[in-house]
Image (cartoon, coloured by chain):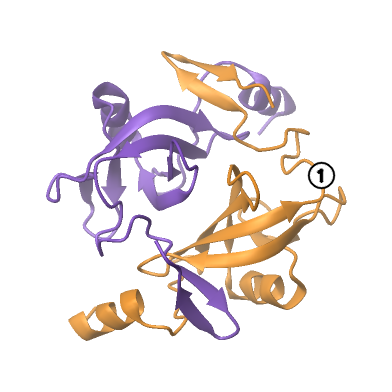
Chain colours: A orange, B purple
Amino acid sequence: MAGSDTHEREQGSDFLPRFDGNGLVTAVACDADSREVLMVAYMNAEALQRTRDTGLATFWSRSRGALWLKGETSGHFLRVQEIRVDCDQDALVLLVRPEGPACHTGAVSCFYRRLDGEGLHRIAD
Amino acid sequence: MAGSDTHEREQGSDFLPRFDGNGLVTAVACDADSREVLMVAYMNAEALQRTRDTGLATFWSRSRGALWLKGETSGHFLRVQEIRVDCDQDALVLLVRPEGPACHTGAVSCFYRRLDGEGLHRIAD
């Protein structure tokens, strides 16, 4: 990428998302209040557009190969308050208000275990 | 994946990281105090092992195709206080103490712009 393109992408006000070879950007959903990371998922251009249009976090499911409105089955939607974009525009942070547990296991966050020594230990919610 | 494997991966205490087709897991570095997301990067097995061995966040640079000790050039290391693992073990949260700006642009976080309407707006540090 030419230097001027990099400068514009990093410092400019144009939204120029950089989708990877699979057409995806990484999206990190964080609780708008606690700032805790709730989940990490991926968006293609359509998922991103739907998220912006509806205010409800919509991802691309890599395992199912399909658009995925988070909460469509569970009712646990993530209402997007703000979208932040990183320096090289290949990752997003979604500040959200969750309408229930963000994790399909029922945990508030998908990150409910910490790595310690060789094993995982559950963190109190 | 068989159901029992899924159960063990989601509920068990064994660390069984799921590297993607490129041999990577997504790693989200968050400030251990403020909980703000500082950067999103990727780790292969070696980067993860080095991070665990040294306590300094080490990634795999997808653009350079090389291991990347964050701060090796700038001195702005990320000291890892805790590693959290998500339900299906393909993403990590690193709670870190940054020894300087996390972003190569000099910003505290790489996520220094919010998306608003069609454009990006800088957030005060």
Q: In terms of image quadrants, where is residue A104?
A: top right
Q: Residue at x 31, y 83 (%)?
A: A8
Q: Quadrant of the C terminus of chain B?
A: bottom left
Q: Is B13 left or right of A108, judged from the image as shown?
A: left
* Whether residue A103 is situated above or below residue B13 in the rendered picture: below
Q: Residue at x 47, y 77 (%)?
A: B121
* Within-10-Å neighbours for mark 1: few <14, some 14–19, many 20+: some
* Whether residue B11 is situated above or below residue A95 in the rendered picture: above
Q: Residue furthest left?
A: B73
The location of residue B119, given as percent across then percent down, is: 51, 84
Res A67 visible: no
Q: Is B53 left or right of B114, judged from the image as shown?
A: left
* Whether residue A79 is situated above or below residue B117 in the rendered picture: above
Q: Residue at x 25, y 61 (%)?
A: B106
Q: Quadrant of the N terminus of chain B?
A: top right
| SS for dot 1 | loop
Comparing B77 with B27, the one in front is B77
Comparing B96 with B34, the one in front is B34
Q: Residue at x 61, y 22 (%)?
A: A123
* Whether residue B14 is situated above or below residue A6 in the rendered picture: above
The location of residue A22, given as percent across then percent down, is: 49, 65
How many numbered marks appear?
Answer: 1
Kindly identify which chain the residue marked by label 1 belongs to. A
The location of residue B75, given as percent across then percent down, is: 15, 45
Comparing B115 with A65, the one in front is B115
Res A53 visible: yes
The location of residue B91, given as percent across then percent down, is: 51, 40
Name the residue carrying label 1. A100
Q: Is B32 left or right of A60, judged from the image as shown?
A: left
- Amino acid type assigned to the residue bearing label 1 in the image: Gly
